[in-house]
Structure formats: C-alpha cells, structure tokens
Image (tube, rainbow, N blue to C red):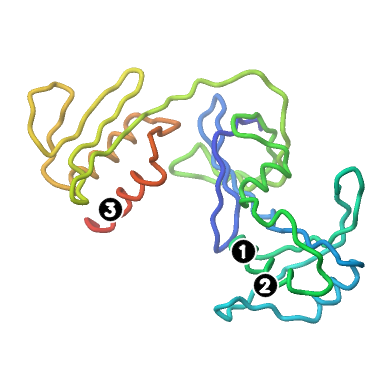
Amino acid sequence: MRLQVFDVDYRTDPLRIRLFGKNSEGVFKLLDRKFRPYFYAVPEEDTGEIEKDLEEKDFTSDKREDLEIIDFEVVEVKDGLESIDVVKVYVGVPATITKLKNELWDLESVSHCREFDIPFYRRYLIDKELRPGSWVEIEGDHQESEKFVSEIEVQDIRPLESSRDLQWKSLAFDLEVIDEDIVMASFYSEKFRKVLSLKDTDLEFVEEVEDQAEMLERFIEIVEDQKADILLGYNTDEFDFDILRDKADETG
C-alpha cells in the first residue's frame, strides 16, 4: 500500500510510533511497535569496557527509579572523516535517555555520549529516511477503525520518490480566552467560516453558545463535520490545545 505521510508522533505504555497518511481511499493510521529509542556511548578506549559496565551495573535516576537498558551492541559510526566503534544503547522509554546518558557519561569507560537529544519521532524519521509529506510503501496487518479507513500494524515501511501530491483539506482555528474561559472560537477554510461566541451578534457567520460546555460541543461538531485533514493555527500546540484539554476536563 502507498500513502502520503502527513504527521508522526509516538505514545508510550506500550511504546509505539504513530504515523498518519492518506491516499485516494482516505486517511490511515499506522502503528510501528518495533522501533526502539537509543543513543550512542563513545568509548574512552575500548567498547568492551563499556559493554562490561552495562552488563554489571544497575542504573537509577536521581529519583531512584530504575532506568531500563533493553539491549546494546557495538556499531560503526562516522566521526568526521573517520569511522569509529561505539556502543548503541537501546532503552525502553524515550524519556529515560537523558537520565541514562548522565549515568553513562560518569563511567570511566565512556568518553562521551551522542545523539541523546534527538526526539524519538524524529529519530524514527531519520532512520527510516522519511519526511512529512513524502510517499511511503507500507506492508502490514490491517485492523478495523472507527476514525480511519483502517489502522495498520506496520511490518515494513519504505520511502518512495514521488512528485504527486494529494489534495489536503485544512481548517484554521483560533481561540480567544478571558479569565481562563473561552469567549470566542473562530474557524476558517477555503469554503467555510464560522465564529462561536458567548455574546450575541447579528453577523450571519457568528453563532452564540450558552456556556463552556456548549462551546466545546460545537467546536468538536464543527471539526468533525468539516472533515479536515489538518488543523491549523498560531501557537495552537502550546496554547489552544492545552486550553481545550483543560476545559474538556472541567466540563466532563
């Protein structure tokens, strides 16, 4: 199956990469549970000393929590124009990489650590040679889904060379907030405009809502009715979505 990928993130417990892609059939959700987070430990002298330390030492964070190392192996990487042997350290949870890096850096066998600051989803894109907007070839098991054409458990994913782009439907939105209450929510797309407001007005594209609960209900209905592939906004990840989550928790 071929898809054009437009978004990627990850979830934990259990750990899985999530990709969202589209073709002429619609939007698909892809799950890759096989990819593991990792970083590199560069030896002071010999990789064997690092391997010995990893086999013998139990690692804990400042909060005394166990820092799980799933596996490790010696690999060859580029160091400028030269190639060197390093230890590739696999972990169970991406958030523990920084803590484990600090633990390993204190070992006499370790000179320094590398690539510990690459976000997990970007690590996936780099290693798989993917980029948002690119076409991919997917092999995997299809499962039924209420929100997508299907969910696919990825067995293999490969980048494709293609200049063909699909038509994407975007919906821009913005929230106006006063004293932590949403007083206005505006929407705009190529063929749609709407404003939800707590105050009445005679403008035809403005719809009055009674309270925060109705504001959220209508917000969700509009997004679902518009069937947008992409929600757009200014600083939405850092502000608007946080407000929506908080209000959803408050109103139940």
Whether pointer 2 and pointer 3 mark residues with C-beta atoms closer than 8 Å, the reply is no
In whole angstroms, how far apart are the C-alphas of marks 2 and 1? 8 Å
Q: Is residue 62 left or right of residue 113?
A: left
Residue under the point 87% across and 61% down: 74
Residue under the point 60% across and 48% down: 31
Q: How crowded is mark 2: few (under 14 residues within 10 Å), some or many (20 or more)?
A: some
Where is mark 3, residue-wise? 248
Q: In this view, does 181 lie to the left or right of 123?
A: left
Q: In this view, does 196 lie to the left or right of 154?
A: left
In whole angstroms, how far apart are the C-alphas of marks 3 and 1? 28 Å
What kind of element bears circle 2? loop
Question: Which percent across, then down, holds residue 226?
Answer: 34, 29
Quarter placement of the N terminus? top right
> Above or below — where is 5 with respect to 101?
above
What kind of element bears circle 1? loop
Mark 2 residue type: Glu
* Numbered label tally: 3
Label at residue 220: none
Residue under the point 33% across and 52% down: 245
Residue closest to the eye, 25 or 71: 71
| Mark in the foreground, 2 or 3 | 2
Q: Earlier in the sequence, mark 2 or mark 3?
A: 2
Whether pointer 2 and pointer 1 mark residues with C-beta atoms closer than 8 Å, the reply is yes
Q: Is residue 203 left or right of residue 162?
A: left
Label at residue 93: 1
What kind of element bears circle 3? helix
Q: How crowded is mark 1: few (under 14 residues within 10 Å), some or many (20 or more)?
A: many
Where is mark 2, residue-wise? 68
Q: Which of marks 2 and 1 is nearer the N terminus?
A: 2
